[in-house]
Image: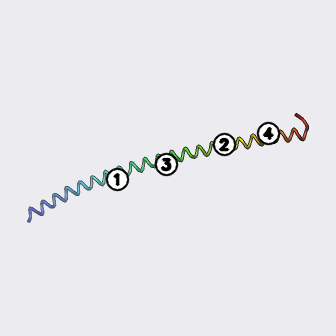
Amino acid sequence: MNKANSLIAIVLVAFSTLAQASVAEGAREFKADVKEAGKKTGHAVHETVHAIGDGAKAAGHAVADASKHGYHATKKFVTGHE
């Protein structure tokens, strides 16, 4: 019975070591996947913010141009100058 217990203990230690290695590898893969997902999310947010900024800038320029045109048209009408 002593040999059987020793054999069982050796088998359990071997399986335990394999299980720990498997868990460690899984943890490394998970960490790499999370880092990659974070980078992709960061890039998407960066591109979205730039697109919103460009749209706001274009809208601001359009409002400024329309205001300038309206100011000059009103001034021309009021003063009668061309």
Q: Nearer the viewer, mark 2 or mark 4?
A: 4
The span from disc 4 to disc 3 (Cα, nearest Å) is: 42 Å
Residue 41 % position (x, y): 49, 48
Q: Which residue is mark 2?
A: 57
How many other residues sit within 10 Å of disc 4, few (<14), some (14-19) or many (≥20)?
few
The image shows residue 36, relative to residue 7, as above or below, that is above
Image quarter in which the N terminus is found: bottom left
The span from disc 1 to disc 4 (Cα, nearest Å) is: 63 Å
Left or right: 57 with respect to 40?
A: right
Which callout, 2 or 1, points at the residue further toward the start of the chain?
1
Which callout, 1 or 4, points at the residue further toward the start of the chain?
1
Q: Which residue is mark 3?
A: 41
Marks 2,4: beta carbons within 8 A: no
Left or right: 61 with respect to 78?
A: left
Q: Which amino acid lies under the numbered mark 4 shown in the image of this protein?
A: His
The span from disc 2 to disc 1 (Cα, nearest Å) is: 45 Å
Q: Secondary structure at mark 3?
A: helix
Residue 29 % position (x, y): 35, 49
Q: Nearer the viewer, mark 1 or mark 4?
A: 4
User: Which mark identifies residue 69?
Assistant: 4
Q: Secondary structure at mark 2?
A: helix
Left or right: 32 with respect to 44?
A: left
User: Which mark identifies residue 27?
Assistant: 1
Residue at (31% x, 52% y) in the render: 24
How many other residues sit within 10 Å of disc 2, few (<14), some (14-19) or many (≥20)?
few
Residue at (58% x, 43% y) in the render: 50
Q: Which amino acid lies under the numbered mark 2 shown in the image of this protein?
A: Lys
Marks 2,1: beta carbons within 8 A: no
The span from disc 1 to disc 3 (Cα, nearest Å) is: 21 Å
Image quarter in which the C terminus is found: top right
